[in-house]
Image (cartoon, coloured by chain):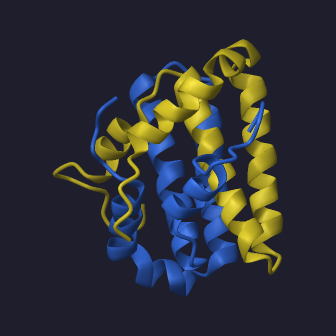
Chain colours: A yellow, B blue
């Protein structure tokens, strides 16, 4: 996997495209949308449509970026802090 | 946000570190772990601990990468296909 897409650029893409709508909706209502996508991912995991499965993974990640945007969280920084620092979590995540 | 961390490299990092354990656990049980982290994110969103909030966003993303790994989904490719192709979704995501 050598794809050059960065977390930061995709989070920014979601911000550029949807921030005004997302911020107006607010965090709680956006969480409900996020969970709806998580449910669709569950359905796709139980199915056999590989294209749909890819789409649902993408949607969950996009809504996670949205939630991060309206809660002032830099996802790449958060990931570095937890998983790529000198003391990453041992064993399970 | 100019962080250089790519989706592909982080998904690979999670694969390198946890794939054997994740694959042995299987998709359904891993989904339960993922949902546990989503629940912790909900708690953090309702709280006021910014460091904890960052950590929970990181955990949800890490477990999404795990789920993608054991279901043979390339997250960066999925995201490009849905959100960065010539016909991205209109309006809401």
| Quadrant of the drawing holding the N terminus of chain A | bottom left
| Quadrant assignment, res B17 | bottom left
Residue furthest out toward the front: B86
Point out residue A11 in the picture as x, y percentages from the top left corner.
Answer: 49, 36
| Quadrant assignment, res B2 | top left
Q: Give the residue at x 80% y 81%.
A: A48
Q: Is residue B36 above or below residue A30?
A: below
Q: Is residue A57 above or below residue B91?
A: below
Relative depth, front residue between A31 and B79: B79
Q: Would residue A91 be seen by someone viewing this image from the given angle?
A: no
Point out residue A47 in the picture as x, y percentages from the top left corner.
Answer: 83, 76
Left or right of A45, for residue B57 = left
Q: Give the residue at x 53% y 63%.
A: B77
Q: Is residue A79 above or below residue A56?
A: above
| Quadrant of the drawing holding the C terminus of chain A | bottom left
Left or right of A11, for residue B13 = left
Left or right of A45, for residue B81 = left
How many numbered badges does the structure rendering display? Answer: 0
Q: Give the residue at x 72% y 19%.
A: A21
Point out residue A74 in the picture as x, y percentages from the top left corner.
Answer: 41, 31
Q: Would residue A88 be seen by someone viewing this image from the given angle?
A: yes
Point out residue A6 in the picture as x, y percentages from the top left corner.
Answer: 38, 47
Q: Give the residue at x 35% y 55%.
A: A4
Relative depth, front residue between B50 and A36: A36
């Amino acid at each position: 996997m050598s794809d050059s897409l960065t977390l930061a650029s995709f989070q920014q893409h979601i911000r550029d495209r949807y921030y005004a709508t997302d911020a107006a909706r607010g965090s709680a209502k956006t969480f409900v949308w996020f969970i709806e996508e998580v449910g669709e991912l569950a359905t796709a995991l139980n199915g056999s449509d590989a294209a749909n499965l890819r789409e649902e993974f993408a949607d969950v990640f996009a809504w996670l970026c949205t939630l991060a945007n309206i809660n002032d969280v830099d996802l790449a920084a958060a990931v570095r802090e937890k998983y790529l620092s000198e003391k990453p979590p041992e064993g399970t995540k």
